[in-house]
Amino acid sequence: MSLPDSEVSSTSNYQNDSLLAQLSLFYHRCAFRGVDAAKLRRVLDHGVDVDPTDSVIYVDGFDKALEYGEWPKLVIALRSDALEATFREVPVNSRTEHLVELEQRFPTALRSVDGQSLWMSRLPATDPRVGSPYEVEYARWIPGDAKAALAAVFILVRPQDVQEIGPFLEG
């Protein structure tokens, strides 16, 4: 893989870096999501594997995305600037209009222990990840055009999976 000069750091030696390191650097403005290859058509048509496209998704670095999805798998790169956190923390005494507006995008509201703030989230109130470090770190959503958010799709196939990938590439 050859990277444009504008993307190469003067302190990096790409000849000795792993492919994973190169991809992570080349797509450093992206978050990654691992999904089953069966979702390929959905990703290509809509930009992301979830329906609706503004559903909550979980993203992280390329290496973590490799842990998800059955083989053969896809790793999708989503532009970080097209993703938003699934929550907002606001003072409980915020303007009513502001709270109503936020409630449209973040329908779950949990009051803090001290009663001074609200944790507003796209996750359902019954989801144990609401308000957790996991939500803060990994949960995102695409509020706009999911196809515009898609930066790349990587199809990963092990030798033993070559026969299985064909149906996903047809059509």
Image (tube, rainbow, N blue to C red):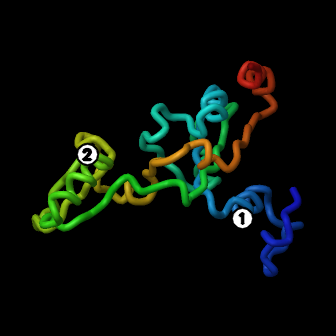
Mark-to-mark CA distance, 1 and 2: 36 Å
Location of residue 88 with respect to 36 vertically, above or below? below
User: What's the residue at 69%, 31% (across, down)?
Assistant: 72
Location of residue 33 with respect to 40 vertically, above or below? below
Seen in the image, is 111 located left or right of residue 153?
Answer: left
User: What's the residue at 45%, 51% (across, down)?
Assistant: 140
Type of amino acid at the residue the image marks with label 1: Leu
In the rendered image, the residue lying farthest to the bottom is: 11
Location of residue 159 with respect to 129 vertically, above or below? above
The numbered dot on residue 25 is 1
Task: Check disc 2 and report the residue beneath it.
Answer: 107
Type of amino acid at the residue the image marks with label 2: Pro
Disc 1 on helix, strand or loop? helix
Relative image position of residue 110 (x, y in whole percent): 18, 53
Relative image position of residue 55 (x, y in whole percent): 43, 40
Looking at this view, is 141 or 63 the one in front? 141
Q: How many marks?
A: 2
Location of residue 92 with respect to 49 vertically, above or below? below
Seen in the image, is 136 located left or right of residue 33?
Answer: left
Q: Could you tell me which quadrant the C terminus lies in?
A: top right
